[in-house]
Structures are given as C-alpha cells and as structure tokens.
Image: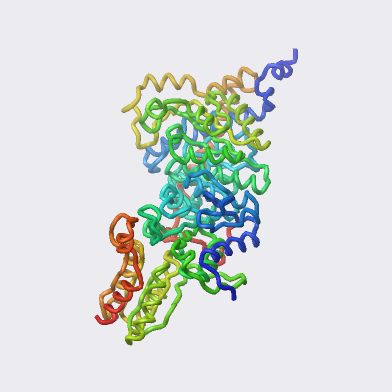
Amino acid sequence: MPVMEYIDAIRLAMREEMERDEDVFVLGEDVGTKGGVFTTTKGLMEQFGEARALDTPLAESAIAGVAIGAAMVGLKPIAEMQYSDFMFPATNQIISEAAKIRYRSNNDWTCPVVIRAPIGGGIFGGLYHSQCPESVFLGTPGLKIVAPYSAYDAKGLLKAAVRDSDPVIFFENKKCYKLITGDVPADDYVVPIGKANVLREGTDITVISYSLPLHFAMQAAEELAKEGISAHILDLRTIQPLDKEAILEAARKTGKVLIIHEDNKTGGVGAEVSAIIAEEMLFELDAPIMRLCGPDVPAMPISPPMERFFMLNKDKVQEAMRKLALF
Amino acid sequence: MNSETSVQQQSKHEMLGLSHQQVIDMYKYMRMARMYDERCLVLQRAGKINFHVSGIGQEAAQVAAAFALDREKDYFLPYYRDYGFVLAVGMTLRELMLSLFAKAEDPNSGGRQMPGHFGSKRLRIVTGSSPVTTQVPHAVGIALAAKMKKKDHVSFVTFGEGSSNQGDFHEGCNFAGVHKLPVIFMCENNQYAISVPVHKQLAGKVSDRALGYGFPGIQVDGNDVLEVYRVMKEARERAIAGEGPTLIEAMMYRLSPHSTSDNDLAYRTKEEVDENWKKDGVVQFQKYLMACGIWSEEQEVELAALIAKQIKEATEYADQAPFPKPEDTLLHVYAVDGEVNA
C-alpha cells in the first residue's frame, strides 16, 4: 500500500475523481499554472487542461458563487479557498445560497458543490493564515462539514464529498499537509460522510476530536498507557451532521469525556458535542465534560512564543487527558 | 390599398423579426403581469395573504427580455419583481398564486419562500433568495457550465440598480468578462432601492460599469418594449457567438410601493409617481399595437375579461389548496439516502 503525505492524498482524490467523471473540475486562485500555493492542485492543469483546473479572479464570493451556479446545472465543482481565513467574503454564498438551495426549492434544485479550505495554525501564519473557522459554519443545516486527520481519510472523505448530492465544506489541515504521512490505498474507496471513527479503544477516558489534534491525542495515549491510563479516542471525521450515536457510544465507554479542537472554545464543535452528551447521558458520566481548545482570542499571533501558546501540542493534550483520568 | 402590406412596411416589430402574433403575445403577458400584480395588492389589503412585492412599471422590459431569449433552452435568474418575465417563460398564474398563498403545491418553493422568490427546474428558472444579487455569480457559473460542456444556452440574470452596488455583481461581471461567458446581465433600474433614490445609490451609470469588465454596457428605455427586445436579441447573439457577456441597464420607474409593507409617499411625491404613470410601457405598447392596426379596443376588453377570469380561477384554486403539512418543515435539508436529483 503506497505511503504518502496528507497533501498528496488530497491531490490524488481530486485526480481520481476528475479521471472518473469529466464533470468534476477545480477552480480557485492559483490552482492552475501554479498548482496551488501549497501544491495541492499541482499537475491537474497539465493533465486535465485549463478549463478543469481553472485559475479564477481573486474574488472568493465569485469562486463560491460561480461554483454553486455550475453545480446547480450538473457539474461537480471543487472550489478552493486559498486559506479558510479568506473564505469569509464567500460566507453569504455558502450560508445563504449553497446551504439552502435544496430546502428553499422544495427539493427541486440541488447544489452538489465541494468547498475546500485549509485550516489551522502552527505555520507562522499570523492572524489571517491560521484560523479554524468551523464554528462559523457549524449550525447551518444544509451544509456538510468534514475535517480529515489522516492521509487515508483525506482521500476517502474528499472523494465522498465530490460524490455527495449536497454542499460539503472540506476543511483540510495545512499543518498536516507535509507533517502527516500514511497508507493510502490506490483503489477507489470513500470514507462515508456522517460517520465518526474509533481510532483507539480504551477504558478510562474518552477523547473526542477531529483534524490535527488527534495526532497529539494518539501520541499522548501511547505514553499514558505506560502510566496505566487507557484512552478511547474518537475521530468525528464529519463535524456536520455530527454522528450522535458514535459520540454517545464513545462517551459511554468510559464515562469521562475530553473534547479537543484548535478552534477557540466558545461556540465551537466541542460545545455542541458536549451538549449532546449532557442531554442524553448526563447521569452516566463520572466526571464533568472537559474541553481543550484554542483560547478565546480573535486569532493566532505570529510571534513564535505566542503561536506556541495558542497551539495545542502533545504535552498539553497529555496533561488534559491525565487530569481527566485522575478526576 | 392592402392595409396588411402597409403595416408590414411600417412596423418596427417586423423589422426586428417579430410577427404580429408574437407582439400581441408579448402584450398579453404584460397585461397579465400587471393585472396579477394589482390583484395581489388587493388580496393583501383584504387580508387574504400576508405579503406581496410588486413589479408594476417593470413588466414591459421583463417581457421583452423573455421574448429575446430561447425559452426552450436558456437559464433564467430573475429577481423578485419579475412577474412579467416568469409568466412569459412559462410559469402559470395558478403557480404564482400558489406561491402567494404559500401552499404546498407551489412549484417555486412548496410554500417555503416569500412570493417573488421564483424557481422551477422545469422552466430553468433558478431558485433565488432574498439577499440581493447573490444570483449574479450563479448565472455566471451556469454560463461557465455551458461553455465547458459546449452547450448553446445562455444565462440571463436580473437585479435592481441598488443591487448593482453589491460585491457579487462586480465579482460576477468580472469573472464573466475574463472568461467571455454567455451571460446577459439586465439591471432593472427602477429609480429606487426601497426608499433610497438612484442619485444616492449611483454616481454614474450602471451600464458604464461594463467597460471596466471588458464587455458592452447598454442603457435602454425600459418602457420601450421593442428597444429592449432589440438590445437583448443582440446580446444573446453575442453570447452564443462566444463574444461574451452584455450588461443592459433598462431604465424604468417602480410605480408601486416597494412592497405591501411600504408607504412610498413618505419618500416621494404623488406628482412624481403620476408623472411616471404617463410613461407606462404597457400602455405605450398597447397604443403601438393599435397604431399598427393589429389590436383593437374590443380585443382589449376581451383580453382583460379573459385574464380577470384566469386570475379569479387561480386565486380560488390557490386559496382552497392545502397548506404544507407542518412537519414537512423538516424535509429536504439533505438528500435522503439513495435520492438522486435529475
């Protein structure tokens, strides 16, 4: 089985889908000749031509809006937002349009668009190249939101997103691009949207997370195992719609839950996951639900000590996991 | 002297390739839209419906535009005043009334959206929303799809002059200009964005904005049906020939208040409104047809009676039609498993 980087898996998913279906195309800033500022779309223009690896004017609302129009008449656009920090001009198109097209037309029109956007910090990106905007889109029914943590999931979830009948936001973690490598089968597989995934079975504490912080949690779990602490780890994979059954099942495994994400704490995915658990099984818990998240500041500063302060890492995660285990 | 020959020699519509029957049909749709709109206002005042947003004063340009398009192929992204347009491309009075009454059978939205928020896949009327001008990039995306798939349809999108200040207008125009896409942008400049007059919305002409995007912008008298038809026809020919988009600014006047929730005399005078009634494009076109000798007072009376009957039937049907089931509020958020939309 080929081992590849997370970013290569994303590129492979696009290539395979474009080979499979000529209605699939990529559009965005610098996605053509340059092959993307991160090289995510490198080689697609050479293989599929300018029209299907379409360099667009620098205008995010048009990138999303044009993709929405094309999707409504049967094409399968993958719109790239260069950084998720820059997708806010497209938010009206995503929330007022893409999310509501099926609903408002009473199932007459549909909008099977994919919007890819890199999230996350730790790359000296400062306030506007580091954000995690999941919470802006969470709570908008009609949108699906996925956030892969591994190369395998990146390929499988992106292929599922392209084949989905509804709009999907694909939040890829830019810190994972080169840092994370893994086995990626060459065959045509999809990772189903809406299904969480147990990464590690355990009995003492349950960690629920998505994207980059899962790697910290997996490393921390290895070390905590030596201390006799057994961690159960659930990857949400899809953060909208949330896999409630899997969340409750994972929480029941241990009765102690820690939710981790890089997006800031207030109003984040953790708040929703925590509310689901509290609503359904509060009296089965053995400890208060804990959250470890980015701080409630507007965004991540660029100065290295400040960036390190903001970012999660293995040690911070391990400490939080140990604290919960000892509660 | 053969009067038929005389008409053919003189009439502008024939020089534009329109038959007598076609211009009569155009007029019928204008009159239908006008009478529909007037009935909606009455129904709201009578408490039968909650809300109506009017297009009175804009029907002439709307119907002219529809007739210049290919009504079997093209994609339409009308805005919320375009009753004349949607009627002319095939929506029925019954369908409009079902939407007005927010009934389950409403093909636009199943009773979910405000009236005036059109959508019908059957008629290639693309579902629209209330935040203005979001439909412009959609029209560009549909035109991009036409170019990519080598299909000979154009997309046609309308919006008001206030909306032409939105970023989506500019982003959409620029994208279409860069890629020379088959799309026609038509601004229905009705002089008011709710209460804000055009001189507080625009320092220049909407049509001049096309220059910055590399395609033609044309200002046209929106009350002149045949002029609108002519520029629209040329715009469609350019689009199909691969010559790119056209921006048309049709000048008109919103004769009715913004909506049934608006008192327009709080921001404009009755004299101003009355002055503009004299320029009403529907009446001008009726006079033109009569001057051509192809329309008469008797036909006018018959037409008005026929439309009144159709509106009455549509109103009664929609009034009696069932509302959506309350729990259907929960349907169609996402595709259900296995559901594939054509």
Residue A272 placement: quadrant: bottom left
Instruction: Tell whether A66 sits left or right of A125.
Output: right
The quadrant of the image that shows the C terminus of chain B is: bottom right
Judge whether A58 appears above or below A286 on screen.
above
Q: Nearer the viewer, residue B221 or A262?
A: A262
Pick the residue in front: A263 or A136: A263
Q: Position of residue A158 (x, y in %)?
A: 53, 64
User: Where residue B97 sits in the image (x, y, percent)?
Assistant: 48, 43
Please say if A252 is above or below A296: below
User: Residue at position x 44%, y 46% from top?
Assistant: B101
Residue A120 seen anywhere in this rendered image of the structure: yes
Question: Residue B12's quadrant in the figure?
Answer: top right
Q: What's the coloring here?
A: rainbow
Quarter of the image with the N terminus of chain B in it? top right
Q: Quadrant of residue B213?
A: top right
- A287 or B113: nearer the viewer: A287
Residue A324, image x and y in percent?
28, 78
Give the image location of residue A94, x and y in percent: 45, 52
Residue located 43% across and 27% down the image? B191
Q: How many marks?
A: 0
**Would you say residue B95 is visible in this rendering?**
no
Residue A286 lies left or right of residue A238; in this view the side is: left
Which residue reaches farthest top?
B1
Q: Is residue A58 left or right of residue B192?
A: right
